[in-house]
Image: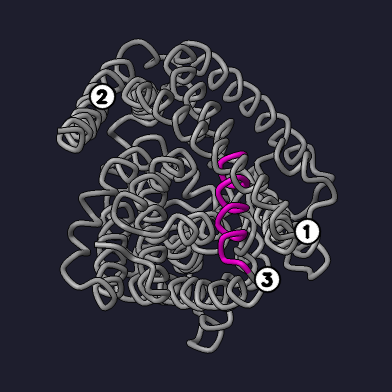
Amino acid sequence: MAEISTSTKKNRLTLYILIALVLGIGLGFVLNTSYVSTENQRIATAEVTIKSLQNQLTTLHDTTFPAYHSLKAEIESLSKSKSAAIIARDDKLEPFSLLADIFLRLIKMIVAPLVFTTLVVGVAKLGDIKSVGRIGGKTLLWFFSASFASLFLGMMLVNFFKPGVAMHLPLPGAAVDTGIKKTALTLREFLYHVFPSSVFESMAKNEILQIVVFALFFGVATAAIGEKGEIVIKAMDAIAHVILKITGYVMKAAPVAVFGAMTAIIAKQGLGILSTYSIFISEFYFGLLLLWIVLLLAGSLFVRKRIFTLLRHIKEPTLLAFSTSSSEAAFPKTMMELERFGCNNRIVSFVLPLGYSFNLDGSMMYMTFASMFIAQAYGIHLDPGTELSMLLVLMLTSKGIAGVPRASLVVIAGTLATFNIPEAGLALLLGIDPLLDMGRSATNVIGNSVATVAVSKWENSLNG
């Protein structure tokens, strides 16, 4: 009876999230065409005029001409007007954005302590450093294989469809500031990002990879002290259960958060952007669908037909990640559902947190798809060797930056600079990025869930 009751509650929550999703889209469309239509029109007009003026600016090679300074001043004035319109629109839609923001803050409140406590318990129960190394090796092998497959699939599809050529979009001038700071791969920065200087700072900033590193040390040390460590393990296990109970309370607010997030996104973007970028959006989502099939087929090699049972278990966190554009929002629920599916909690608590730094499959595919799209839009031909080099650069620079805001765009910006592709091309994608982020986030949940199940089966730790 308890299992039936739990299943009914899960189905109800999924239904409520779906209803909230549809209502949010509907209300967002109404608000876009009425409540914030003036602000949206001002923003659209300013963007078109700014692009036109920037193109004129590129034709003036002598910066001492009065016309050059006049154009610069006009662009600056229009940029201020656009910023003011965006602020005014955001103020109007703030009540809806707050619904999603508060939910995401509550989720972030849970994630760091949940990762730490469950991982410490999981590692301590493994018993020795050899077990940690064995499972870690299998996990990273899966992650890098999945990342390569995602990047390669994105590159194959974008070369097949050539959306950058087919769409004939007006190109932004080279001087356009996208507001995205590029990142470069340096060993020092990567290591600083991996190893924490303060675990409290890592907790405060939700630096999952740094928390994982500290938890590994803490868990191994707890197991090493023997009987005294049992007290710590029991305490951590109890705290983890308390946090999972809190997760249950927070998840009740998920439909409200989904409603607020969808209303704000559609009110800002409108459905018109779907027609303008229909080619890119449809081809990218087709690519994500293919990636889902590849990941699920890979998972079925380990669990056979149970892969469909896994899909039923993770439909709720996947839908939540899609509607809030945040795979992090789905983390606690994903952890609970994987354990219900039959994965050992020590494997779940080890693999899943690592996945959020090393195995963002949807984001991986987007990086090659977007980078090649921008190159195509500018008419830049890249030979197969250069494309493979780009894939490897993206593979390395993307690891461990999951906590960076707009991480995918940051990595893409750095990659474009490396291969002499105009970074201003990112401006082509900024408008639709929130819509694409929804699909990326949902795919990240699927990828990490399949990875956890595969490693569990690999370790003979999968029940059912």
Residue 103 or 449: which is nearer the viewer?
449
| Numbered range of the magenta stretch | 113-127
For the residues labelled 3 and 2, the Cα–Cα distance comes to 42 Å
Residue at x 39% of width, y 76% of height: 458
Does the magenta portion include 114? yes
Which mark sits nearer the N-terminus, 2 or 1?
2
The residue wearing badge 1 is 195
Q: Amino acid at mark 2?
A: Ala
Q: CA distance from mark 1 to mark 3?
A: 26 Å
The residue singled out by tag 3 in the image is: 418
Which of the two labelled residues, at mark 1 and mark 3, occupies the earlier sequence position? Answer: 1
Residue 39 drawn above or below residue 146: above
Q: Measured along the vertical axis of the image, is residue 453 above or below residue 22?
A: below
Q: Secondary structure at mark 1?
A: loop
Instruction: Name which of mark 3 and mark 2 comes first in the sequence.
Output: 2
Q: Position of residue 179 (x, y in %)?
A: 65, 42
Is residue 356 in view?
A: yes
Please identify the quarter of the rendering in which residue 20 is found: top left
Between 251 and 155, the one lying in front of the other is 251
Q: What residue sits right under mark 2 in the picture?
A: 20
Q: Quadrant of residue 51?
A: top right
